[in-house]
Amino acid sequence: ESERLQKISEILLDSAFIRENDIEMVNTDLATILFDATIKLQAKAKKADVTVVCESSSMVVNGNDTLLSMLFYNLIENAIKACSAGGKVAISCFENQAIIEDNGKGMSQEQLLHITEPFYRTDKSRSRAEGGAGLGLALCNQIVQTHNANMIFNSEPGKGTKVFVNFTSRK
């Protein structure tokens, strides 16, 4: 419980920091960030018996490395959690778009309407057991907005979820 509360506190502090500060943006290779997040999550994926594949070509965006790392770590981790044993997560980026796709349990249209709201959890029992508080995607949404990007979720129950992060300005 204390670990869960600590994680909630950290997310709330990150969110406040993003809101209250000018964030330094530099040319950042998104493929490198995606590969790094994939490597960091390999142990979690292996434990869940989920295959994670990252096939990305170099894509430079004007962004903040730390925030983009948080964004994609969270999205990839969520995709892994959504999969059953034997599941797959595919990550790619090209042109001005990054895509994270899983073949997990998926979400209803009603759930999709609320997933970036603070404290909303699609699977309340699973999220509580894993320490989730429903803040991860709210923080992701804030990071995306800070980067003048947008995030689109396509999902269908039983068929998985596909997340598109579209960057409007590339350098």
Image (cartoon, helix red, strand yellow):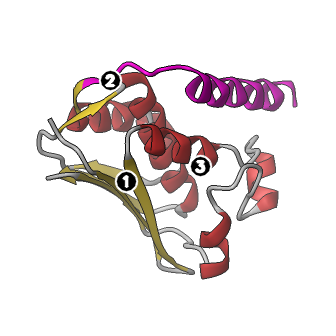
Q: CA distance from mark 3 to mark 1?
A: 22 Å
Does 48 appear above or below 103? above
Query: Disc 1 versus disc 2: distance between alpha carbons?
Result: 32 Å
Q: Which mark is residue 25?
A: 2
Percent of width and height locating residue 99? 31, 57
**Dot 1, how many residues are within 10 Å of its Cα: few (below 14), some (14-19), or many (20+)?**
some
Look at the numbered discs 3 and 1 and tell me whether their residues touch, using CB distance below 8 Å: no
Q: Secondary structure at mark 2?
A: loop
2 is higher (above) or lower (below) than 82: above
Mark with earlier residue (3, 1): 1
**Label 3 is placed on what type of residue?**
Leu
| Residue for badge 3 | 137
| 114 within the magenta span | no
In this image, 75 relative to 54: left or right? Answer: right
Q: In this orientation, which residue lies closer to the viewer: 134 or 86?
A: 134
Which three-letter amino acid code belongs to the residue tagged 1? Thr
Other residues around mark 2 within 10 Å, as few (<14) / some (14–19) / many (≥20): some
Q: Looking at the image, is mark 1 or mark 2 nearer the viewer?
A: 2
Please tell me whether mark 3 or mark 1 is closer to you in this view: 3
Q: Quadrant of the N terminus?
A: top right
- Residue 113 at x, y percent in the picture: 63, 71
| Mark 3 or mark 2, whichever is nearer to me | 2
The residue that appears at 49% across and 55% down in the rendered structure is 79
The magenta stretch is 1-26
For label 1, the residue is 51
